[in-house]
Image (cartoon, rainbow, N blue to C red):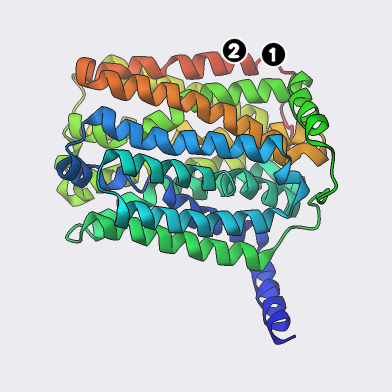
Amino acid sequence: MGDGVHRGSFQRLLIAAGPVLVVSVAQLLGTSLWFSANSVAGSLAKAWGLDTAGMGWLTNAVQLGFICGTLAVSLHGYADRYRASRIFAVSAVAGALLNAGFALLSVGLVSALAFRFLVGVTLAGIYPLGMKLIVGWAPERAGFALSMLVGMLTLGTGLPHALHLFGADLPWQATILASSALALAGAVLVYGLGDGPHSVTTGRLGKPARALRGSIFSAFGIPKFRASALGYFGHMWELYTFWTMVPVFVISTHLGRYATLGGVSGVSFIVIGIGALGCFAGGYLSRFIGSARVAKYSLLLSGLCCLVFALTWHWLSGAETFALLIVWGITVISDSPHFSALSAAACPRELIGSALAIQNSIGFAITIASIALIAGLFDHIGLNVAWLLLPGPILGLLGFRKGGWTAGQPM
């Protein structure tokens, strides 16, 4: 009885603070697991003799795990059959433990890849389920609310770089363990909050797996869902590879010499973390011009930044390069929540969790190819790899423009 009373009081406190804010903060904490290894790339390179391609595979291990996890979540209907808050909390706890295993038990690249893969599997219960939680609490303003969520995910992606900056004199394992502690805090927040009043949960006796799989893939037959998914896929070719390569870009353009910004870790955190402002600004704008326009213009601007960087990196000054990377960091992520909001609005409510999970799964499969290609070629062609990011925005815009979305849909 006493535990129930205390939990009820905690839930009321969290609801009073704002469910969208609580889920967004939990997403920030939980997704700090994602790029925790990249934040200590220099230390791992020295300890294990890793090159750029090796670090790329550490990121790809997480992406591959995430793909396997989201496939399981979507094809078996877990996201729509069980309470999203429980899946999120259990996944965050498991991810924190596996991330700690990476820090304490890895002895080289092979064992590290195994732990990072399993961390990726657990992230499948954090990122798409966080989106479902947001829609369950605030369906009438999904674009704005998801912008908050993805903004926090962006900060979570950059957070390990900040942790490493402030713990520069500590062993690299300390940064990884700090990310695990943050993920545990995120689990507590979401478990205490619970699911929103608009969440749809079918329970253990939902559709048979075969029928459910057919329903999920039928979402791609809906023109608007297909268009937003194609825009999302083009965006994903660029996004995670850009985030993976930011420290390499910083080193290669000598921006790490900006000691007042914290060197490589400090500049990397700024370039990645500034994307949160892009998400927040895009969410605000979506209330006036709609998610469709925000998604389209963000993808266009991001592609232009990529083109300008590819054309001019060899002669830009340090200040000009930093300014360009800042704009790129803002626009490379600001479209993401709106593609998800548009997809959620286009498919039946009872399939939102699974449809978003399968969209995530395909999108992250695309990132594996992009990261492997660009990280693998960097040691051969240097910063000219930026040209290989450009097809993502171009093809995404071509796929999205035929979907029938109009300005003002949805808020």
Residue 382 drawn above or below residue 138: above
Q: Is residue 198 left or right of residue 170?
A: right
Residue beneath label 1, please? 402
Q: Is residue 13 left or right of residue 105?
A: right
Residue 146, percent from left and from top = 62, 45
Q: Assign a secondary structure to mark 1.
A: loop
Residue 242 drawn above or below residue 191: above
Verify CB contact (< 8 Å) between mark 1 and mark 2.
yes
Residue at the far bottom in the pictured view: 2
Residue 181, percent from left and from top = 42, 64
Sort mark 2 into few (<14), some (14-19) or many (20+) by Cα contacts within 10 Å: some
Residue beneath label 2, please? 398
Quadrant of the drawing holding the C terminus:
top right
Query: Does any portion of residue 149 appear in the rendered image?
Result: yes
What's the residue type where badge 1 is placed? Lys
Residue 309 falls in which quadrant of the image? top left
At 38% from the left edge and 26% from the top edge, which residue is drawn? 371
What's the residue type where badge 2 is placed? Leu
Quadrant of the drawing holding the N terminus:
bottom right
Name the residue nearer the viewer: 268 or 214: 214
At 48% from the left edge and 50% from the top edge, which residue is drawn? 31
